[in-house]
Amino acid sequence: VEFTVGSEPIKNFRMIERHYFKDTLLKSFDFDFGFCIPNSTNTCEHIYHFPKLTKILIADMINNPFETRSDSFFFVDGVLIMHNKAEYSYNGSLDN
């Protein structure tokens, strides 16, 4: 993750990321970045384990483009400042 901080310090920066297939939660991650100094560019690498997916589930994800989704929630001092949604296609298609 790389992000740039503006002219104000950021206290208690946190990101929660959730990955879904259809309506099933596959994995949830919670990252605390803590205090971020003003006018800085920050990089942080998180190595995490994703649950092993069955061959049937992988095939289902490939055959159902854009049914795999993620939600990323960004908080500063406990206040939600941004919510980003993404959809994924694993079959190379750009169409739903």
Image (spheres, rainbow, N blue to C red):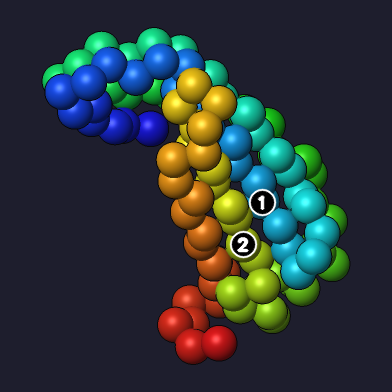
Q: Is residue 35 above or below residue 24?
A: above
Counting every numbered tag in the picture gives 2
What amino acid is labelled 1 in the image? His
Image point (84%, 67%), residue name: 56
Q: Quadrant of the N terminus?
A: top left
Q: Is residue 24 left or right of residue 35?
A: right
Q: Is residue 4 left or right of residue 13?
A: left
What amino acid is labelled 2 in the image? Arg
Q: Nearer the viewer, residue 57 or 83?
A: 83
Q: Position of residue 85 (x, y in %)?
A: 52, 59
Q: Nearer the viewer, residue 60 or 19?
A: 19
Q: What numbered label is drawn on residue 28?
A: none
Give residue 29's quadrant in the image.
top right
Q: Which residue is mark 1?
A: 19
Q: Is residue 65 left or right of residue 61?
A: left
Q: Position of residue 95 (x, y in %)?
A: 49, 88
Disc 1 is placed on an element classified as strand
Q: Is residue 18 above or below residue 54?
A: above
> Sequence-wise, which precedes: disc 1 or disc 2?
1
Whether the residues at callouts 1 and 2 have beta carbons within 8 Å, the answer is yes
Image point (32%, 15%), residue name: 36
On the question of residue 47 being in view, the answer is no
Q: Position of residue 50 (x, y in %)?
A: 70, 39
Q: Quadrant of the C terminus?
A: bottom right
